Image: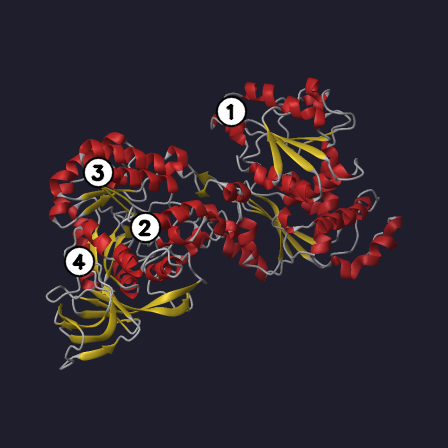
Amino acid sequence: MIKHLLSIDQLDREAIVRILDTAESFREVGTRVIKKVPALRGRTVVNLFYENSTRTRISFEIAAKRLSADVINFATAGSSVAKGESLKDTALTLQAMGADAIVIRHSSSGAPLTLSRWVTASVLNAGDGTHEHPTQALLDLFTIREHFASFEGLRVAVVGDVRHSRVARSLTLGVARVGGQVTLVGPPTLIPPEAPAWGAEVSYDLDAVLPKADVCYMLRVQRERQRQQFFPSIREYSRLWGLSRARVDALPDGALIMHPGPMNRGVEIASDVADLPRSVITDQVTNGIAVRMSLLYLMLGGARVANHVLAADAEGAPGE
Amino acid sequence: MSERVLFRGARLIDPASNHRDRTDVLVEDEEVGGVGPGLSSARAEVIDCDGLVLAPGLVDLHAHLREPGFEHKETVESGSRAAAAGGFTAVCAMPNTDPVADNAAVVIEVRNLADKAGLCDVHPAGAITRGLQGETLTDIAEMAEHGVRLFTDDHNCVQSSRVMRLALEYAKAFEVVIAQHAQDASLSEGWQMHEGYYSSLLGLTGAPGEAESIVVARDLALARLTAGRLHVTHVSAADSVRLLRDGRERGIRVSADVTPHHLALTDGDLIGYDTSLRVNPPLRTSEDRDALRAALADGTLDAVATDHAPHAPEEKEQEFDQSPPGTIGLETALAVVLTELVGPGLIELPAAIERLSLGPARILGLDDQGGPVAPGRPANLVVFDPSTEWTVGDRPFQSQARNSAFTGRRLRGCVLHTMLRGRFTVKEGQPTR
């Protein structure tokens, strides 16, 4: 398994399938009364979050705790970073304290890669700038796989602010890697003209794409983009690229509605659409824990010490 | 002070005299004493130059020596030492110091610091506008009286068409050149690299080549309007080259330079977020690079200029978007040109030497630099071994900084001796002071 997870591009198809298969086993742990296995007992996972994040940080924290790792949450506000400590010195400090894995969220694209050059711990990219969010893409693939027999030929429409979306980059590369086909949809100002080179198709017409989509993946649109003039008004954006109730009817039967969260209800997605049965947005959150358990387990070599635990603990008994 | 030195059997590449054959060069006191085969070595220190090239000392139009104000990055002395180690005998120091070189006092201070170091002639550039703010012209005449030949707001681009027009117009009275760092501010807001496939993949904010070429087009129009003298520094985009070529054909008084890193590297090299490769203007595509190479060879681009931009390690060892742009370049410029352009046959060695010495000396109006290497001329010389290979970073930099875009790369061509007015500033590869 890879040492660091910095980009979805590092993973070949087999590696992705292995991560999802392993996550399958771990998802069951979350259904037990005692949701814990001892796979990473004695290992230390640091959540290093330079950017606010509720769902990703908590998801990683729960994942590590369910594997019995010791989890340190290092939020930069009020920390040594707020006192001006550099990423390098923070990295060397965490290294000196014996971190086995560092989960990093950072507003600068490439920060996880830079960090990985300074530490021996495994680095997991929990979202870097407008670059990538590989664990999100993996949990999305996991969620899609629950509903479709195969990724082959699967049609995924990714709708919204592709230009600034780390989720869109990782998901596009990930879906292409497992054999699916992504169409990026949004205003031309928010889709890089080079996007076809990522292996995606591009459309500016959501209504033309929806009838052919197996998955309709809505991206969060920040209101700041309107202020930056990427589109003239929220109203116009919502009218052209928002997923309304009427548009849902254009989707084929069985098509899924997904969103990485947090949602802007009423902007990119109508409120009642988000709560439809075919919307799997909360499943994405649940699956995120299993996928992150799988990654921590595989990357920290948990497989060596704890392969037997999963089998033996199927009854729900704690492993420790 | 004075020395009598015989460079024996060097291949003399002297663009000003078109000399390109093996010969002896005698240096007496501060001047070239003789050029020709079989010169007498009486009372002279003999330097065997078999297999070596002797050329006029190199001239850099664009170096940030950082002093005053940013001595933690570089000083005039350490920058001069780096220049000498790279074979330079004259550099033009950029004005974005603190205080800004927008008045004669700072110009005089920089020159005094350079004289004290005594390793390289330093010609301070003056700011076009006060505080590099792009609004109010500086006292150009007073700085010109103190020897300033080139004015630039480098690091900033003069955004206002009116201010740029007035600068080009006003400067005509003093035979100085207005040099522009061409970059449209609104098209390059928040930029981190060239806008293209790689920026889209890396999630870094891009600035398109058009952010540069739009300003080049405007400035050419203003140079034509004013009959002023324009220099475009560190050209990076193929479109700019096209505009410059067209401008020259139309008789506009324009010159231009290009950096070694834009001649050698592309935006694809940023795939590892290496902050040493974060430069301003950004590295562009291989098509842009190829256009720059061709333009240097055909003379559309007059000079190679380093844009030597030293930074402290802690400034560069940061997240990509938080690190300041710039690479050092004085100590690698010659070798990069030899390796990337002369080696593959993209430019002849004499033309390459011209772009590194006589070409920039002419733009700065320096009569004592760039050759010819002839009796009675100031002995500003460089001797280099064109075939020795070395790895950048293996030996310490003479610059106080080490943020080189070429660290780890194999280059061919190594400076052995640099001589400033008959005195070695570098001998056997080592600075003499």
Which residue is at 87% across, 50% downward?
Answer: A314
Q: Which residue is mark 1?
A: A231
On residue B251, the disc is 3
Q: Which residue is mark 2?
A: B296
> Tag 4, which secondary structure?
helix
A96 or B7: nearer the viewer: B7
Calculate the distance from the C-alpha at mark 4 to the C-alpha at mark 3.
38 Å
Q: Position of residue B407 (x, y in %)?
A: 43, 61
Q: Which residue is mark 4?
A: B112
Q: Amino acid at mark 4?
A: Asn
> Is the C terminus of chain A in the top left, top right, bottom left or bottom right quadrant?
bottom right
Neighbor class of circle 2 (other Cα within 10 Å; few <14, some 14-19, many 20+) is: many
Q: Chain of mark 2?
A: B
Q: Amino acid at mark 1?
A: Phe
Q: Is residue A225 above or below residue A142?
A: above
> Tag 2, which secondary structure?
helix
> Tag 1, which secondary structure?
loop
Calculate the distance from the C-alpha at mark 4 to the C-alpha at mark 2.
34 Å
Neighbor class of circle 1 (other Cα within 10 Å; few <14, some 14-19, many 20+) is: some
Q: Position of residue A297 (x, y in %)?
A: 73, 54
Q: Chain of mark 3?
A: B
Q: Chain of mark 1?
A: A
Q: Is residue B332 above or below residue A278?
A: below
Calculate the distance from the C-alpha at mark 1 to the C-alpha at mark 4.
55 Å
Neighbor class of circle 4 (other Cα within 10 Å; few <14, some 14-19, many 20+) is: some
